[in-house]
Protein backbone atom coordinates (compact mmCIF):
# COMPACT_ATOMS: atom_id res chain seq x y z
CA UNK A 1 0.00 0.00 0.00
CA UNK A 2 1.46 3.32 -1.07
CA UNK A 3 2.24 5.76 1.73
CA UNK A 4 0.58 9.15 1.52
CA UNK A 5 2.98 12.08 1.04
CA UNK A 6 2.63 15.26 3.07
CA UNK A 7 4.21 18.63 2.64
CA UNK A 8 6.47 18.00 5.61
CA UNK A 9 8.17 14.96 4.05
CA UNK A 10 11.61 15.25 2.48
CA UNK A 11 12.60 14.63 -1.11
CA UNK A 12 13.45 10.96 -0.66
CA UNK A 13 10.02 10.19 0.82
CA UNK A 14 8.41 12.02 -2.09
CA UNK A 15 10.36 10.11 -4.71
CA UNK A 16 7.51 7.85 -5.90
CA UNK A 17 5.44 10.90 -6.92
CA UNK A 18 8.30 12.54 -8.87
CA UNK A 19 9.84 11.83 -12.24
CA UNK A 20 13.43 10.61 -12.22
CA UNK A 21 14.75 14.00 -13.40
CA UNK A 22 12.77 15.88 -10.76
CA UNK A 23 13.85 13.40 -8.09
CA UNK A 24 17.54 13.82 -8.97
CA UNK A 25 17.08 17.59 -8.94
CA UNK A 26 15.50 17.44 -5.47
CA UNK A 27 18.35 15.27 -4.16
CA UNK A 28 20.90 17.73 -5.51
CA UNK A 29 19.09 20.65 -3.88
CA UNK A 30 19.01 18.78 -0.57
CA UNK A 31 22.72 18.05 -0.74
CA UNK A 32 23.55 21.69 -1.38
CA UNK A 33 21.22 23.14 1.24
CA UNK A 34 23.73 23.12 4.13
CA UNK A 35 26.12 25.25 2.09
CA UNK A 36 23.55 27.59 0.55
CA UNK A 37 24.61 30.26 3.08
CA UNK A 38 28.18 30.17 1.80
CA UNK A 39 29.59 27.90 4.52
CA UNK A 40 32.66 25.94 3.45
CA UNK A 41 31.58 22.82 5.35
CA UNK A 42 28.16 21.50 6.45
CA UNK A 43 27.00 21.10 10.02
CA UNK A 44 25.86 24.56 11.00
CA UNK A 45 27.52 27.15 13.21
CA UNK A 46 29.13 25.85 16.42
CA UNK A 47 28.17 27.37 19.77
CA UNK A 48 31.59 27.90 21.36
CA UNK A 49 29.99 29.30 24.52
CA UNK A 50 28.29 25.99 25.36
CA UNK A 51 29.54 24.45 28.63
CA UNK A 52 31.01 21.40 26.91
CA UNK A 53 33.06 23.66 24.61
CA UNK A 54 33.94 26.57 26.91
CA UNK A 55 37.39 25.08 27.40
CA UNK A 56 38.14 26.08 23.80
CA UNK A 57 37.97 29.77 24.69
CA UNK A 58 39.81 29.09 27.96
CA UNK A 59 42.80 28.02 25.85
CA UNK A 60 42.98 31.43 24.23
CA UNK A 61 42.49 33.21 27.56
CA UNK A 62 45.41 31.28 29.09
CA UNK A 63 47.64 31.82 26.05
CA UNK A 64 46.95 35.56 26.26
CA UNK A 65 47.65 35.57 29.99
CA UNK A 66 50.99 33.73 29.83
CA UNK A 67 52.33 35.25 26.61
CA UNK A 68 51.60 38.81 27.73
CA UNK A 69 52.94 38.17 31.23
CA UNK A 70 56.23 36.87 29.82
CA UNK A 71 56.57 39.81 27.42
CA UNK A 72 55.46 42.36 30.04
CA UNK A 73 58.12 41.31 32.53
CA UNK A 74 60.85 41.58 29.86
CA UNK A 75 61.27 45.36 30.15
CA UNK A 76 61.45 45.26 33.94
CA UNK A 77 63.75 42.23 34.08
CA UNK A 78 66.12 42.70 31.14
CA UNK A 79 66.25 46.49 30.73
CA UNK A 80 65.66 47.82 34.26
CA UNK A 81 67.02 45.08 36.54
CA UNK A 82 69.76 43.36 34.49
CA UNK A 83 70.47 46.33 32.16
CA UNK A 84 71.19 44.21 29.09
CA UNK A 85 71.88 46.21 25.88
CA UNK A 86 68.69 46.95 23.97
CA UNK A 87 69.74 44.90 20.91
CA UNK A 88 70.42 41.92 23.19
CA UNK A 89 67.02 42.41 24.79
CA UNK A 90 65.41 42.40 21.33
CA UNK A 91 67.23 39.20 20.44
CA UNK A 92 66.31 37.51 23.71
CA UNK A 93 62.68 38.36 23.08
CA UNK A 94 63.01 36.95 19.57
CA UNK A 95 64.38 33.71 21.01
CA UNK A 96 61.55 33.54 23.53
CA UNK A 97 59.09 34.03 20.69
CA UNK A 98 60.89 31.59 18.37
CA UNK A 99 58.31 28.93 19.25
CA UNK A 100 55.75 31.00 17.35
CA UNK A 101 57.88 30.36 14.27
CA UNK A 102 57.67 26.60 14.81
CA UNK A 103 53.88 26.34 14.73
CA UNK A 104 54.05 24.20 11.61
CA UNK A 105 55.90 21.50 13.58
CA UNK A 106 53.36 21.54 16.40
CA UNK A 107 50.52 21.53 13.86
CA UNK A 108 51.97 18.55 12.00
CA UNK A 109 52.17 16.59 15.25
CA UNK A 110 48.63 17.55 16.29
CA UNK A 111 47.10 16.72 12.90
CA UNK A 112 48.87 13.44 12.21
CA UNK A 113 49.68 11.89 15.62
CA UNK A 114 46.47 11.48 17.66
CA UNK A 115 46.85 10.46 21.30
CA UNK A 116 44.17 8.18 22.77
CA UNK A 117 42.16 8.72 19.58
CA UNK A 118 42.16 12.52 19.99
CA UNK A 119 44.06 15.13 17.97
CA UNK A 120 43.62 18.27 20.08
CA UNK A 121 42.86 17.79 23.78
CA UNK A 122 45.89 15.67 24.76
CA UNK A 123 48.30 18.16 23.21
CA UNK A 124 46.60 21.04 24.96
CA UNK A 125 47.05 19.32 28.33
CA UNK A 126 50.63 18.28 27.50
CA UNK A 127 51.55 21.82 26.51
CA UNK A 128 50.25 23.28 29.74
CA UNK A 129 52.25 20.71 31.73
CA UNK A 130 55.45 21.94 30.04
CA UNK A 131 54.62 25.61 30.56
CA UNK A 132 53.70 25.12 34.20
CA UNK A 133 56.92 23.16 34.85
CA UNK A 134 59.12 25.87 33.27
CA UNK A 135 57.46 28.65 35.22
CA UNK A 136 57.71 26.65 38.44
CA UNK A 137 61.43 26.00 37.81
CA UNK A 138 62.05 29.71 37.31
CA UNK A 139 60.06 30.56 40.42
CA UNK A 140 61.70 28.19 42.88
CA UNK A 141 65.12 27.22 41.50
CA UNK A 142 66.49 30.30 39.69
CA UNK A 143 66.80 33.33 42.01
CA UNK A 144 67.82 36.60 40.37
CA UNK A 145 71.39 37.94 40.75
CA UNK A 146 71.98 41.37 42.34
CA UNK A 147 70.78 44.26 40.16
CA UNK A 148 73.12 46.02 37.71
CA UNK A 149 72.78 49.52 39.21
CA UNK A 150 73.06 50.59 42.84
CA UNK A 151 70.18 52.24 44.65
CA UNK A 152 70.42 55.96 45.46
CA UNK A 153 69.29 57.73 48.61
CA UNK A 154 65.84 58.26 47.10
CA UNK A 155 65.26 54.51 46.83
CA UNK A 156 65.57 54.55 43.03
CA UNK A 157 68.43 53.37 40.82
CA UNK A 158 71.49 55.59 40.57
CA UNK A 159 72.33 55.05 36.91
CA UNK A 160 75.81 56.53 37.36
CA UNK A 161 76.90 53.82 39.82
CA UNK A 162 77.23 50.18 38.75
CA UNK A 163 76.96 47.52 41.47
CA UNK A 164 76.93 44.26 39.48
CA UNK A 165 78.41 44.60 36.01
CA UNK A 166 77.95 40.88 35.36
CA UNK A 167 74.16 41.19 35.65
CA UNK A 168 73.86 42.24 32.00
CA UNK A 169 75.16 38.81 30.98
CA UNK A 170 72.69 36.82 33.09
CA UNK A 171 69.59 37.15 30.94
CA UNK A 172 70.18 34.19 28.63
CA UNK A 173 69.23 31.46 31.13
CA UNK A 174 65.91 33.13 31.90
CA UNK A 175 65.24 33.66 28.19
CA UNK A 176 65.91 29.95 27.55
CA UNK A 177 63.35 28.82 30.15
CA UNK A 178 60.79 31.35 28.94
CA UNK A 179 61.34 30.06 25.40
CA UNK A 180 60.66 26.49 26.54
CA UNK A 181 57.54 27.69 28.37
CA UNK A 182 56.43 29.32 25.12
CA UNK A 183 56.90 26.00 23.31
CA UNK A 184 54.58 24.45 25.88
CA UNK A 185 51.66 26.81 25.48
CA UNK A 186 52.25 26.76 21.73
CA UNK A 187 51.00 23.15 21.68
CA UNK A 188 47.76 24.38 23.24
CA UNK A 189 47.55 27.36 20.92
CA UNK A 190 48.07 25.31 17.74
CA UNK A 191 45.45 22.78 18.80
CA UNK A 192 42.99 25.57 19.56
CA UNK A 193 43.77 27.18 16.19
CA UNK A 194 42.86 23.91 14.46
CA UNK A 195 39.50 23.93 16.23
CA UNK A 196 39.07 27.57 15.21
CA UNK A 197 39.44 26.65 11.53
CA UNK A 198 37.01 23.73 11.91
CA UNK A 199 34.42 25.96 13.56
CA UNK A 200 34.94 28.89 11.19
CA UNK A 201 34.49 26.76 8.06
CA UNK A 202 30.99 25.87 9.29
CA UNK A 203 30.00 29.54 9.54
CA UNK A 204 28.00 31.26 6.80
CA UNK A 205 29.85 33.52 4.40
CA UNK A 206 28.32 36.54 6.09
CA UNK A 207 29.48 35.50 9.57
CA UNK A 208 32.72 33.70 8.70
CA UNK A 209 35.49 35.24 10.76
CA UNK A 210 33.23 35.70 13.78
CA UNK A 211 34.68 32.74 15.72
CA UNK A 212 38.24 33.77 14.85
CA UNK A 213 37.67 37.29 16.09
CA UNK A 214 35.99 36.08 19.28
CA UNK A 215 38.93 33.79 20.02
CA UNK A 216 41.43 36.63 19.72
CA UNK A 217 39.17 38.91 21.72
CA UNK A 218 39.22 36.40 24.58
CA UNK A 219 42.99 36.06 24.22
CA UNK A 220 43.33 39.81 24.63
CA UNK A 221 41.21 39.66 27.79
CA UNK A 222 43.73 37.18 29.18
CA UNK A 223 46.50 39.58 28.23
CA UNK A 224 44.73 42.34 30.14
CA UNK A 225 44.71 40.20 33.27
CA UNK A 226 48.46 39.69 32.86
CA UNK A 227 48.97 43.44 32.71
CA UNK A 228 47.08 43.86 35.98
CA UNK A 229 49.18 41.16 37.68
CA UNK A 230 52.52 42.50 36.42
CA UNK A 231 51.61 46.17 36.66
CA UNK A 232 50.50 46.13 40.28
CA UNK A 233 52.43 43.23 41.78
CA UNK A 234 55.79 43.77 40.05
CA UNK A 235 56.13 47.53 40.49
CA UNK A 236 58.86 47.87 43.10
CA UNK A 237 61.90 50.17 42.75
CA UNK A 238 64.15 47.34 41.53
CA UNK A 239 61.95 47.07 38.42
CA UNK A 240 61.71 50.85 37.90
CA UNK A 241 58.27 50.77 39.49
CA UNK A 242 56.23 53.42 41.26
CA UNK A 243 55.75 51.64 44.58
CA UNK A 244 58.16 51.17 47.48
CA UNK A 245 57.16 47.51 47.55
CA UNK A 246 56.63 44.85 44.97
CA UNK A 247 56.78 41.14 44.29
CA UNK A 248 59.76 39.59 42.56
CA UNK A 249 59.96 38.19 39.05
CA UNK A 250 60.32 34.73 40.60
CA UNK A 251 57.12 35.13 42.61
CA UNK A 252 55.19 36.24 39.52
CA UNK A 253 56.39 33.11 37.71
CA UNK A 254 55.14 31.01 40.63
CA UNK A 255 51.68 32.60 40.42
CA UNK A 256 51.54 31.98 36.67
CA UNK A 257 52.64 28.36 37.15
CA UNK A 258 49.69 27.68 39.44
CA UNK A 259 47.20 29.46 37.16
CA UNK A 260 48.45 27.56 34.11
CA UNK A 261 48.18 24.23 35.94
CA UNK A 262 44.39 24.74 36.11
CA UNK A 263 44.28 24.56 32.31
CA UNK A 264 45.27 20.90 32.37
CA UNK A 265 41.91 19.54 33.66
CA UNK A 266 40.02 22.21 31.68
CA UNK A 267 41.64 20.92 28.48
CA UNK A 268 40.61 17.37 29.29
CA UNK A 269 37.03 17.83 30.49
CA UNK A 270 35.64 21.07 29.01
CA UNK A 271 36.37 20.63 25.31
CA UNK A 272 34.21 18.45 23.09
CA UNK A 273 36.20 16.50 20.53
CA UNK A 274 35.06 13.36 18.69
CA UNK A 275 37.33 10.32 18.60
CA UNK A 276 39.26 9.85 15.37
CA UNK A 277 37.97 6.91 13.34
CA UNK A 278 40.80 4.31 13.45
CA UNK A 279 40.19 3.48 9.79
CA UNK A 280 40.70 7.16 8.91
CA UNK A 281 43.63 7.76 11.25
CA UNK A 282 45.85 10.27 9.44
CA UNK A 283 49.50 9.37 8.94
CA UNK A 284 52.48 11.69 8.77
CA UNK A 285 52.76 11.04 5.03
CA UNK A 286 49.09 11.94 4.58
CA UNK A 287 49.59 15.15 6.51
CA UNK A 288 52.66 16.03 4.44
CA UNK A 289 50.67 15.33 1.27
CA UNK A 290 48.00 17.76 2.47
CA UNK A 291 50.66 20.39 3.10
CA UNK A 292 52.07 19.84 -0.38
CA UNK A 293 48.61 20.17 -1.93
CA UNK A 294 48.01 23.45 -0.15
CA UNK A 295 51.48 24.92 -0.75
CA UNK A 296 51.54 24.01 -4.44
CA UNK A 297 48.56 26.29 -5.02
CA UNK A 298 49.32 29.64 -6.59
CA UNK A 299 46.71 31.24 -4.34
CA UNK A 300 48.50 30.01 -1.23
CA UNK A 301 51.92 31.00 -2.56
CA UNK A 302 50.81 34.60 -3.06
CA UNK A 303 49.62 34.77 0.55
CA UNK A 304 52.91 33.18 1.71
CA UNK A 305 54.90 35.90 -0.07
CA UNK A 306 52.68 38.61 1.37
CA UNK A 307 52.92 37.31 4.94
CA UNK A 308 56.67 36.72 4.87
CA UNK A 309 57.96 39.66 2.85
CA UNK A 310 55.35 42.07 4.16
CA UNK A 311 56.01 41.05 7.75
CA UNK A 312 59.79 41.21 7.34
CA UNK A 313 59.74 44.66 5.73
CA UNK A 314 57.06 46.11 7.97
CA UNK A 315 58.74 44.75 11.10
CA UNK A 316 62.11 46.44 10.54
CA UNK A 317 62.36 49.14 13.17
CA UNK A 318 64.82 51.13 15.22
CA UNK A 319 66.46 49.55 18.26
CA UNK A 320 66.20 52.84 20.16
CA UNK A 321 62.69 52.27 21.48
CA UNK A 322 63.54 50.66 24.83
CA UNK A 323 66.10 53.32 25.80
CA UNK A 324 63.82 56.19 24.75
CA UNK A 325 61.07 54.70 26.89
CA UNK A 326 63.29 54.35 29.96
CA UNK A 327 65.65 57.34 29.83
CA UNK A 328 63.98 60.07 27.77
CA UNK A 329 60.29 59.50 28.43
CA UNK A 330 60.96 58.25 31.99
CA UNK A 331 58.28 55.57 31.73
CA UNK A 332 57.80 53.62 34.94
CA UNK A 333 56.47 50.11 35.32
CA UNK A 334 53.08 50.97 36.82
CA UNK A 335 52.24 53.68 34.31
CA UNK A 336 53.42 51.51 31.44
CA UNK A 337 51.18 48.64 32.43
CA UNK A 338 48.20 50.90 33.17
CA UNK A 339 48.43 52.32 29.66
CA UNK A 340 48.92 48.86 28.22
CA UNK A 341 45.75 47.81 30.03
CA UNK A 342 43.85 50.79 28.61
CA UNK A 343 45.30 50.04 25.18
CA UNK A 344 44.12 46.45 25.49
CA UNK A 345 40.60 47.70 26.22
CA UNK A 346 40.71 49.70 23.00
CA UNK A 347 42.18 46.68 21.18
CA UNK A 348 39.28 44.54 22.39
CA UNK A 349 36.87 47.23 21.23
CA UNK A 350 38.57 47.18 17.83
CA UNK A 351 38.15 43.41 17.57
CA UNK A 352 34.49 43.69 18.54
CA UNK A 353 33.86 46.44 15.98
CA UNK A 354 35.55 44.37 13.28
CA UNK A 355 33.48 41.31 14.23
CA UNK A 356 30.30 43.37 14.28
CA UNK A 357 30.65 45.63 11.25
CA UNK A 358 33.66 44.77 9.05
CA UNK A 359 33.64 41.02 8.37
CA UNK A 360 32.73 41.80 4.76
CA UNK A 361 35.01 44.83 4.29
CA UNK A 362 37.92 44.84 1.84
CA UNK A 363 40.96 43.28 3.54
CA UNK A 364 43.43 45.27 1.46
CA UNK A 365 41.76 48.62 2.12
CA UNK A 366 41.50 47.90 5.84
CA UNK A 367 45.22 47.09 6.13
CA UNK A 368 46.21 50.08 3.98
CA UNK A 369 44.15 52.53 6.02
CA UNK A 370 45.15 51.17 9.43
CA UNK A 371 48.88 51.12 8.56
CA UNK A 372 48.83 54.76 7.47
CA UNK A 373 46.75 55.83 10.48
CA UNK A 374 49.10 54.09 12.94
CA UNK A 375 52.16 55.84 11.50
CA UNK A 376 50.48 59.24 11.43
CA UNK A 377 49.50 58.86 15.09
CA UNK A 378 52.91 57.55 16.17
CA UNK A 379 55.14 60.22 14.60
CA UNK A 380 54.22 63.33 16.67
CA UNK A 381 54.58 61.53 20.01
CA UNK A 382 57.90 60.00 18.99
CA UNK A 383 59.61 63.08 17.52
CA UNK A 384 58.46 65.45 20.26
CA UNK A 385 60.01 63.08 22.80
CA UNK A 386 63.24 62.67 20.81
CA UNK A 387 63.84 66.42 20.45
CA UNK A 388 62.89 67.20 24.04
CA UNK A 389 59.75 69.23 23.24
CA UNK A 390 57.72 67.07 25.62
CA UNK A 391 59.34 64.38 27.72
CA UNK A 392 56.58 63.04 29.86
CA UNK A 393 55.69 59.40 30.36
CA UNK A 394 51.94 60.00 30.10
CA UNK A 395 52.34 61.88 26.83
CA UNK A 396 54.67 59.23 25.40
CA UNK A 397 52.39 56.36 26.41
CA UNK A 398 49.39 58.03 24.79
CA UNK A 399 50.63 56.90 21.38
CA UNK A 400 50.19 53.21 22.19
CA UNK A 401 46.70 53.95 23.48
CA UNK A 402 45.61 55.71 20.29
CA UNK A 403 46.97 53.18 17.79
CA UNK A 404 45.30 50.21 19.50
CA UNK A 405 42.06 50.50 17.54
CA UNK A 406 43.58 50.43 14.03
CA UNK A 407 46.14 47.83 15.16
CA UNK A 408 43.36 45.46 16.24
CA UNK A 409 41.62 45.75 12.90
CA UNK A 410 44.83 45.30 10.92
CA UNK A 411 45.83 42.25 12.96
CA UNK A 412 42.61 40.27 12.75
CA UNK A 413 41.86 41.10 9.11
CA UNK A 414 45.23 39.71 8.02
CA UNK A 415 44.41 36.23 9.36
CA UNK A 416 40.91 35.80 7.91
CA UNK A 417 42.43 34.46 4.69
CA UNK A 418 43.78 31.37 6.49
CA UNK A 419 40.33 29.84 6.96
CA UNK A 420 39.57 30.34 3.27
CA UNK A 421 42.74 28.51 2.20
CA UNK A 422 42.40 25.59 4.64
CA UNK A 423 41.05 22.20 3.61
CA UNK A 424 39.07 19.66 5.63
CA UNK A 425 41.32 17.37 7.67
CA UNK A 426 44.31 19.70 7.58
CA UNK A 427 42.98 22.55 9.70
CA UNK A 428 45.89 22.62 12.12
CA UNK A 429 48.48 22.42 9.37
CA UNK A 430 46.87 25.20 7.35
CA UNK A 431 46.88 27.53 10.33
CA UNK A 432 50.32 26.32 11.40
CA UNK A 433 51.99 26.75 8.00
CA UNK A 434 50.64 30.21 7.26
CA UNK A 435 51.11 31.60 10.77
CA UNK A 436 54.61 30.09 10.86
CA UNK A 437 55.41 32.01 7.69
CA UNK A 438 54.09 35.20 9.25
CA UNK A 439 55.81 34.60 12.58
CA UNK A 440 59.15 33.81 10.93
CA UNK A 441 59.19 37.30 9.52
CA UNK A 442 59.35 38.63 13.09
CA UNK A 443 62.71 37.15 14.13
CA UNK A 444 64.09 37.94 10.68
CA UNK A 445 63.05 41.59 10.93
CA UNK A 446 64.62 41.70 14.42
CA UNK A 447 67.90 40.40 13.02
CA UNK A 448 67.76 42.88 10.14
CA UNK A 449 66.91 45.70 12.55
CA UNK A 450 69.84 44.82 14.80
CA UNK A 451 72.17 44.75 11.80
CA UNK A 452 70.93 47.92 10.09
CA UNK A 453 70.65 50.08 13.19
CA UNK A 454 73.68 48.55 14.87
CA UNK A 455 76.01 48.65 11.86
CA UNK A 456 75.19 51.97 10.20
CA UNK A 457 74.42 54.25 13.15
CA UNK A 458 77.11 55.95 15.26
CA UNK A 459 77.05 56.63 18.19
CA UNK A 460 75.34 53.37 19.07
CA UNK A 461 71.56 53.38 19.45
CA UNK A 462 71.88 50.56 22.00
CA UNK A 463 74.26 52.30 24.43
CA UNK A 464 72.35 53.90 27.32
CA UNK A 465 75.23 56.38 27.88
CA UNK A 466 74.37 58.16 24.63
CA UNK A 467 70.83 58.80 25.88
CA UNK A 468 72.16 60.14 29.17
CA UNK A 469 74.51 62.51 27.29
CA UNK A 470 71.58 63.53 25.04
CA UNK A 471 73.54 65.53 22.46
CA UNK A 472 71.79 67.28 19.51
CA UNK A 473 73.72 65.09 17.07
CA UNK A 474 72.51 61.93 18.76
CA UNK A 475 68.90 63.19 18.78
CA UNK A 476 69.10 63.65 15.00
CA UNK A 477 70.49 60.16 14.62
CA UNK A 478 67.64 58.65 16.63
CA UNK A 479 65.09 60.65 14.62
CA UNK A 480 66.54 59.38 11.34
CA UNK A 481 66.32 55.82 12.63
CA UNK A 482 62.57 56.32 13.07
CA UNK A 483 62.20 57.86 9.60
CA UNK A 484 63.87 54.79 8.11
CA UNK A 485 61.56 52.56 10.16
CA UNK A 486 58.50 54.32 8.72
CA UNK A 487 59.87 53.91 5.18
CA UNK A 488 60.21 50.16 5.67
CA UNK A 489 56.67 50.02 7.11
CA UNK A 490 55.15 51.81 4.13
CA UNK A 491 57.16 49.73 1.65
CA UNK A 492 55.35 46.62 2.92
CA UNK A 493 52.10 48.08 1.56
CA UNK A 494 53.41 47.59 -1.99
CA UNK A 495 52.84 43.86 -1.47
CA UNK A 496 49.11 44.22 -0.72
CA UNK A 497 48.01 43.01 -4.20
CA UNK A 498 49.30 39.57 -3.20
CA UNK A 499 46.57 39.41 -0.53
CA UNK A 500 43.04 38.58 -1.74
CA UNK A 501 40.53 41.35 -1.25
CA UNK A 502 37.88 39.21 0.45
CA UNK A 503 36.47 35.67 0.82
CA UNK A 504 35.07 35.48 -2.72
CA UNK A 505 38.36 36.45 -4.33
CA UNK A 506 40.22 33.90 -2.19
CA UNK A 507 37.97 31.08 -3.39
CA UNK A 508 38.26 32.34 -6.96
CA UNK A 509 42.06 32.33 -6.74
CA UNK A 510 42.00 28.77 -5.37
CA UNK A 511 40.02 27.69 -8.43
CA UNK A 512 41.96 29.61 -11.08
CA UNK A 513 45.57 30.00 -9.95
CA UNK A 514 47.95 27.40 -11.44
CA UNK A 515 49.65 24.78 -9.28
CA UNK A 516 53.37 24.09 -9.21
CA UNK A 517 55.75 22.06 -7.06
CA UNK A 518 58.11 25.03 -7.29
CA UNK A 519 55.74 26.94 -5.01
CA UNK A 520 56.07 24.21 -2.39
CA UNK A 521 59.85 24.12 -2.79
CA UNK A 522 60.26 27.89 -2.48
CA UNK A 523 57.98 28.04 0.57
CA UNK A 524 59.91 25.25 2.33
CA UNK A 525 63.19 27.01 1.51
CA UNK A 526 61.85 30.26 2.97
CA UNK A 527 60.89 28.49 6.19
CA UNK A 528 64.18 26.59 6.52
CA UNK A 529 66.52 29.45 5.61
CA UNK A 530 64.68 32.13 7.58
CA UNK A 531 64.45 29.94 10.66
CA UNK A 532 68.11 28.91 10.50
CA UNK A 533 69.34 32.44 9.81
CA UNK A 534 67.26 34.06 12.53
CA UNK A 535 68.01 31.44 15.16
CA UNK A 536 71.76 31.53 14.50
CA UNK A 537 72.08 35.31 14.66
CA UNK A 538 69.80 35.66 17.66
CA UNK A 539 71.81 33.06 19.58
CA UNK A 540 75.04 34.90 18.67
CA UNK A 541 73.59 38.10 20.12
CA UNK A 542 72.90 36.60 23.57
CA UNK A 543 76.13 34.62 24.08
CA UNK A 544 78.55 36.91 26.01
CA UNK A 545 81.55 36.07 23.81
CA UNK A 546 79.74 36.73 20.50
CA UNK A 547 77.20 39.44 21.32
CA UNK A 548 79.74 42.08 20.30
CA UNK A 549 79.83 40.88 16.66
CA UNK A 550 78.54 43.44 14.16
CA UNK A 551 76.37 40.85 12.42
CA UNK A 552 74.64 40.25 15.78
CA UNK A 553 73.99 43.97 16.24
CA UNK A 554 77.05 44.72 18.37
CA UNK A 555 79.81 47.26 17.80
CA UNK A 556 82.47 44.74 16.81
CA UNK A 557 84.74 42.55 18.90
Image (cartoon, grey):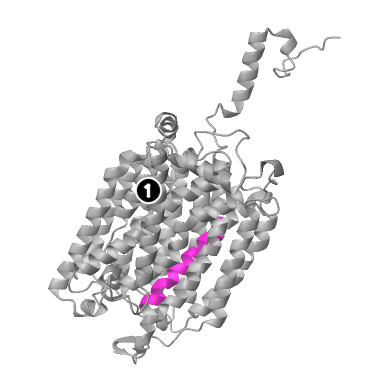
Quadrant for the N terminus in the image: top right
Say which of 176 and 248 sits in front: 176
Residue 63 shown left or right of residue 492 in the figure? right
Near mark 1 (Cα within 10 A), the count class, few <14, some 14-19 or many ≥20, is many
Q: Is residue 225 visible in the rendered structure shown here?
A: no
Q: Is residue 14 above or below residue 123?
A: above
Task: Work out whether 172 lies above or below 35.
Answer: below
Q: Residue at x 55, y 44 (%)?
A: 427
- Taking the image as shown, residue 365 lies to the left or right of residue 37, namely left
- In the current view of this chain or complex, which residue is farthest to the bottom? 153
Position of residue 192 measured from the top left corner of the image (x, y, whole percent): 57, 52
Give the extent of the magenta segment: 60-79
List x then y, in percent, for residue 431.
49, 47
Q: Residue 254, located in which quarter of the rendered image?
A: bottom right
Q: Quadrant of the C terminus?
A: bottom left
Residue 536, x across and y down, in percent: 37, 66
Q: Which residue is mark 1?
A: 307
Amino acid sequence: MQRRVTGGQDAEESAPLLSKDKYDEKKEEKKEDPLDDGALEPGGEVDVLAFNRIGYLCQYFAVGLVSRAISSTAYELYICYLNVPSYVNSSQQAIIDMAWSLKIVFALISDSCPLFGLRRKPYMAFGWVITSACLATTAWFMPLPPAYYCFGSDGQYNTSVVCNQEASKEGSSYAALMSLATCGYMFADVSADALTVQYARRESKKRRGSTQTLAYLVRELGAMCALVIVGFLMSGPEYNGSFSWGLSFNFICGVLAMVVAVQIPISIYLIEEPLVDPSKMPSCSTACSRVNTMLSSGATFEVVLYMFLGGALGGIGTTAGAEITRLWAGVQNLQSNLFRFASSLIFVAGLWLTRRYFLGASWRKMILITTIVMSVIDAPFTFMTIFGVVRNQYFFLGEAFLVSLPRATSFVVSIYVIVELAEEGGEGLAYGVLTTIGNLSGPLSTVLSNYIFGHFFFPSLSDSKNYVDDTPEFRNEVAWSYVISYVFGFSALLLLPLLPDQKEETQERKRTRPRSQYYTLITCMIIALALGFSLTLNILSVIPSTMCLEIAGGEGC
